[in-house]
Image: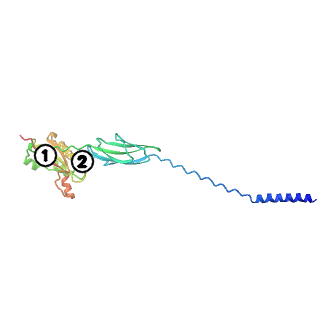
Amino acid sequence: MRSKSCVIGLCLLLGLIVLCSACHKRVPAAATPAPAPSAAPAAPGPPTCNLTAEPATVTAGQSVTLSWNSQNATGLELKPGLGQQQAEGSTSVTPSESTTYTMSLTGTGGTGECSARVTVTPAVPPAPQVQESNITAKPNAAEAMQDAFFDFNKADIRPDAQGALTHDADYLKGHPDVKIRIGGYCDQRGSEEYNLGLGQRRADAAKQFLVNLGVAPDRIATVSFGKDRPFCTENTDECYQKNRRAHVVVVSPSS
């Protein structure tokens, strides 16, 4: 009996030891989560640019400045014929005719382009120079001639101008040896180029009116002085009106 009690006691002791060992067993620490991978950089967008021309309208022979900037471009080619360029810059060109300049772009995000238009107007030839030494004025005829006046920005023969030109036609038909030159004039407003054209239209309109009244066209020369030779230099409506005219000068070939 005693031996059996010893065995039971030994078993209880071993169980107690095992139980204590389980209670003191270390709990493993929780695993630290791995850091999330960083986001990949965004892909660059398509290349873009801005191209300007200053001035956008020139007379033949004048220069223009082309300026540009770009984004996301690795290659830039300026056409026509200006080659590879930096991402930002400017250059001077002298086009001989109206031209559209184009910047072609390449980049990792694709291709693109931008453009600027330059309008080239023909150079205005200088007004023909009348050699006063080769003409002889007829005083009486010159005093008889009357000028035709025009409204602002117009080349229409208005009623008072019709009366003046009819008077001139009557004199010329009565004096077939007299020849005249009609000069077209404008006021000081507007560009020189525009006023040269307007002055020519005024001179031509006056000539056509005289021709319609029976004056031979080969007796009438025309020239435009635009705004270069004003009769009045004040900036007033009255002065402007004096400058808007077809001025008749009587000439005849010298002997």
The residue wearing badge 2 is 193
Q: What residue is drawn where x is 20% and y is 55%?
A: 241
Identity of the amino acid at label 2?
A: Glu
Colouring method of the image = rainbow
Q: Describe the element under mark 1 as helix, strand or loop.
A: helix
- Identify the mark nearer the N-term, 2 or 1: 1
Report, in whole angstroms, how far the alpha carbon at label 2 lies from the one at label 1: 34 Å
The percent coordinates of residue 123 (x first, y second) are 24, 43
Q: What residue is drawn where x is 35% and y is 43%?
A: 101
Query: Position of 173 compared to 94: left or right?
Result: left
Q: Is residue 51 visible?
A: no
Camera-side residue of 42 and 52: 42
Camera-side residue of 249 and 192: 192
Identity of the amino acid at label 1?
A: Asp
Q: Give me the disc on residue 153.
A: none
| Quarter of the rendering occupied by the C terminus | top left
Q: Is residue 247 visible?
A: yes
Mark 2: few/some/many CA within 10 Å (<14, 14-19, 20+): some
The percent coordinates of residue 175 (x first, y second) are 9, 43
The residue wearing badge 1 is 170
Q: What residue is drawn where x is 82% and y is 58%?
A: 15
Camera-side residue of 55 and 240: 55
The percent coordinates of residue 120 (x first, y second) are 29, 44
| Quarter of the rendering occupied by the N terminus | bottom right
| Most distant residue in the right direction | 1
Q: Describe the element under mark 2 as helix, strand or loop.
A: helix
The percent coordinates of residue 88 (x first, y second) are 38, 48
Between marks 2 and 1 in the image, the one whose residue lies nearer the viewer: 2
Count of numbered labels shown in the rendering: 2
Query: Position of 118 compared to 24: left or right?
Result: left
